Amino acid sequence: MASRAVVRLSKSVFSRSVLPRVVIAKALSSNASPRERIWSCKKETDRSQIGLECLKDMVVDGDIQLFDVREPHELASLGKIPKSVNIPLAQVVEAFSMSPAEFKEKYRVPKPDVKDENLIFHCQSGRRAQKAVEGVKQLGFEKAIIFAGGWSEWEFYIKRRPQAVPRKVSYER
Ligand SMILES: O=S(=O)([O-])[S-]
């Protein structure tokens, strides 16, 4: 009787709370790869996108290559996500076809590697970023993903919860 209760209790403890917590703790540790961190935050199984909370963590952490494919005038008038680099959609394929030296000279950041797992594209609401991801995937950047919520979701979040933006990251407008 008592042993059955113990088995039942330990099954529920291990299956529902302890193990997932261990997995989550590992995924959130500084040793976790960017991809482990991304997917630890996601409940859904769609691995082609990143959600706002995880994006925010990566922005704070700095371990991110985030490209904003809107037009420069949109960034100037609406604002930009910290750490993002602007490459308008029409230039994306050309940019990601450049040599690392040309890319660095033009965009002032290192060119991502085809194997990078922290390569993320966003725009205003997802449409252009989707095209950008499709374009770079054709060039071999298979692990590129999209922040579909884009600037719209980031701005909505910031406006509703400005205190949630860590001080380390300045809110650029
Ligand atoms: O930014 S958008 O192309 O989704 S309108």
Image: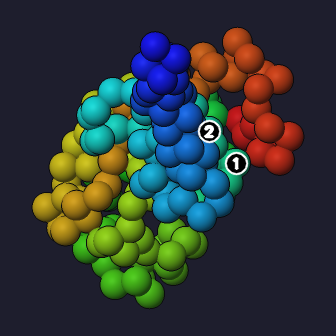
Quadrant of the image occupied by residue 147: top left
Q: Residues within 10 Å of mark 1 (few under 14, many from 20)?
A: some
**Pick the front one: 39 or 112:** 39
Say which element carries label 2.
helix
Q: Residues within 10 Å of mark 2 (few under 14, many from 20)?
A: some
Alpha carbon distance from label 2 to label 1: 6 Å
> Which amino acid type is shown beneath numbered disc 1?
Val
**Pick the front one: 63 or 108:** 63
Say whether mark 2 is within 8 Å of ligand 1: no
Q: Residue, x 49% and y 57% (percent of image)?
A: 34
Left or right, 127 with respect to 88, comes to left
Q: Residue, x 46% and y 13% (percent of image)?
A: 1
Residue 115 visible within the image: yes
Q: Residue, x 52% and y 17% (percent of image)?
A: 2
Q: What x and y, as percent, mark residue 90?
A: 28, 51
What residue would you read off at disc 2? Answer: 56
Say which element carries label 1.
helix
> Which amino acid type is shown beneath numbered disc 2?
Lys
> Which color mode does the image show?
rainbow
